[in-house]
Image (cartoon, coloured by chain):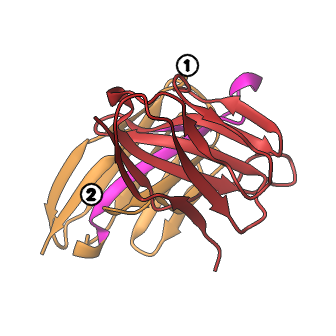
Chain colours: A orange, B red
């Protein structure tokens, strides 16, 4: 069974600070996605990474896929109150055909940015 | 507007009373999926469907049924709901890329179920 872990579980920071959240697994994924979820809404896709070592930037957000495609990180520069939300990583399996189409979500990192 | 629509958004019911949560998407997506979200556990996949009449179990399928008779609809059925199925449920859909890999998913706004 594939398992995605995220850390930290909760994070509360002041506006303007930088932060990094992590997504780790013992399994290799063909792709990994990051979503952000706000209260009362469904998750919304931020980015997809597919190549080991890949780095993608989305304004102040930087996403990296580990070389072995087992982990990923999300770095936010100069956090703003609008960044507040639950950040979820999700992986799609690569090694086992039976899990090829399954999507595994991590438990999420709840971020609160205080003005 | 491209969207995934779930109904109802909120439901309080009693143990054993059959219920159905509907999900409809207007993007002609092949892949649809149901998740439940619980504190500390994140989103867990219940069932998914890769196309009409093709469904497969996710990680937590016990106590649930689904059907995919039409491409746009993917209802979730709880034949005999129990209190441990109290949760926040999300339906999602995505298209398939050229190599058959599911694309990132579009989520509905969620259905909050309370089983008393």
Q: Is residue A73 left or right of residue B79?
A: left
Q: Which residues are magenta?
A: A83-106
The subunit carrying tag 1 is A
Q: Is residue A58 left or right of residue A81?
A: right
Q: Are marks 2 and 1 on the same chain?
A: yes
Pointer 1: residues within 10 angstroms few (<14), some, or many (20+)? few
Nearer-the-camera pick, B89 or B93: B89
Q: Are marks 2 and 1 in contact (CB under 8 Å)?
A: no
What is the x, y in percent for residue B63?
51, 25
Quarter assignment of residue A100:
top right
**Residue at point 44%, 75% (across, down):** A59
* Number of marks drawn: 2
Q: Which residue is mark 1?
A: A1
Specify the label residue B27 is tagged with: none
Q: Is residue A108 left or right of residue B35?
A: left
Q: Which residue is mark 2?
A: A19
Return the disc, 2 or 1, that comes first in the chain's sequence: 1
What is the x, y in percent for residue B111?
43, 53
């Amino acid at each position: 069974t594939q398992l995605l872990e995220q850390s930290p579980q909760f994070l509360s920071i002041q506006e303007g600070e930088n932060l990094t959240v992590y997504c780790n697994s013992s399994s290799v994924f063909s792709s990994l996605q990051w979503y952000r979820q706000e209260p009362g809404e469904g998750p919304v896709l931020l980015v997809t990474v597919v190549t080991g070592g890949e780095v993608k930037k989305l304004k102040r957000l930087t996403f990296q896929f580990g070389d072995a495609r087992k982990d990923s990180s999300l770095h936010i520069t100069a956090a703003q109150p609008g960044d507040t939300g639950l950040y979820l990583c999700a992986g799609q399996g690569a090694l086992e055909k039976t899990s090829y189409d399954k999507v595994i979500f991590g438990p999420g990192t709840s971020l609160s940015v205080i003005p | 507007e491209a969207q995934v629509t779930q109904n109802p958004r909120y439901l309080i019911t009693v143990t054993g009373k059959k219920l159905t949560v509907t999900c409809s998407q207007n993007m002609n997506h092949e892949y649809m999926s149901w998740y439940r979200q619980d504190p500390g556990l994140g989103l867990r996949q219940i069932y998914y469907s890769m196309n009409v009449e093709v469904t497969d179990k996710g990680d937590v399928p016990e106590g649930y049924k689904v059907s995919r008779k039409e491409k746009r609809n993917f209802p979730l059925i709880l034949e005999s709901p129990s209190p441990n199925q109290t949760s926040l449920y999300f339906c999602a859909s995505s298209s398939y890329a050229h190599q058959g890999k599911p694309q990132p998913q579009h989520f509905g706004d969620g259905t909050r179920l309370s089983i008393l």
